[in-house]
Amino acid sequence: MNADEPEDPQRQGLRERLETILITTEKATSWHEEAGHLRALVNHEGYVPIRTRLAIEDLEFLAGARTELLRFSELGLRLLDLHQPRDAGGITSDAAHPILRCRSCMWRWPCPTFRAMSESFGREAAEGP
């Protein structure tokens, strides 16, 4: 994008929303380790009767976490639907492995969008910290 061109307001609004989610998430406490300990406390009704101290950042994060995770999941699925391989139709010496391009952006497969998603949401990212 040319620096002289004004930023698209919809794009800027979406960027601000994503940055807000990122900042809120970074401020919240990770429950990764605590979740393992809490699983052992599940009672016969299927709940963990606990008392805990939560910071305001934790409450803000927890209040919107489900909705935001649903939105990100939907976004990921939509991006995967848009960015998928297709035969580029070129002549190749290896008919078993044709040259592929992205259906949406026409970059050589895997396209930058798919690679970024794979790096962020792939198996390595799922293993967590």
Image (tube, rainbow, N blue to C red):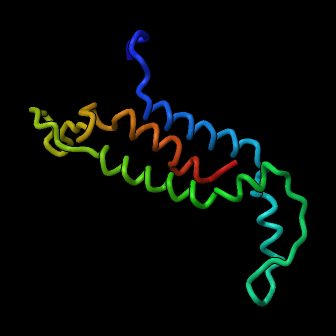
Q: Nearer the viewer, residue 95 or 57?
A: 57
- Residue placed at 34% from the left, 35% from the top? 111
Is residue 69 rendered to the left or right of residue 62?
left
> Where is residue 18 shown, x and y percent of the image?
56, 40
Q: Nearer the viewer, residue 27 or 102?
A: 27
> Where is residue 4 shown, x and y percent of the image?
41, 9
Furthest residue toward top: 4
> Where is residue 119 shown, x and y percent of the image?
50, 41
Q: Nearer the viewer, residue 63 or 81?
A: 63
Is residue 97 rendered to the left or right of residue 121?
left
> Where is residue 60 shown, x and y percent of the image?
73, 52
Furthest residue toward bottom: 44
Quarter holding the N terminus?
A: top left
Res. 113 image quadrant: top left
**How many numbered tags mark residues here?**
0
- Residue placed at 37% from the left, 51% from the top? 78
Is residue 115 rendered to the left or right of residue 54?
left
Residue 117 in the image: above or below residue 5:
below
Is residue 59 rendered to the left or right of residue 118?
right
Q: Nearer the viewer, residue 42 or 124?
A: 42
Residue 69 in the image: above or below residue 100:
below
- Residue placed at 42% from the left, 18% from the top? 6
- Residue placed at 89% from the left, 64% from the top? 52
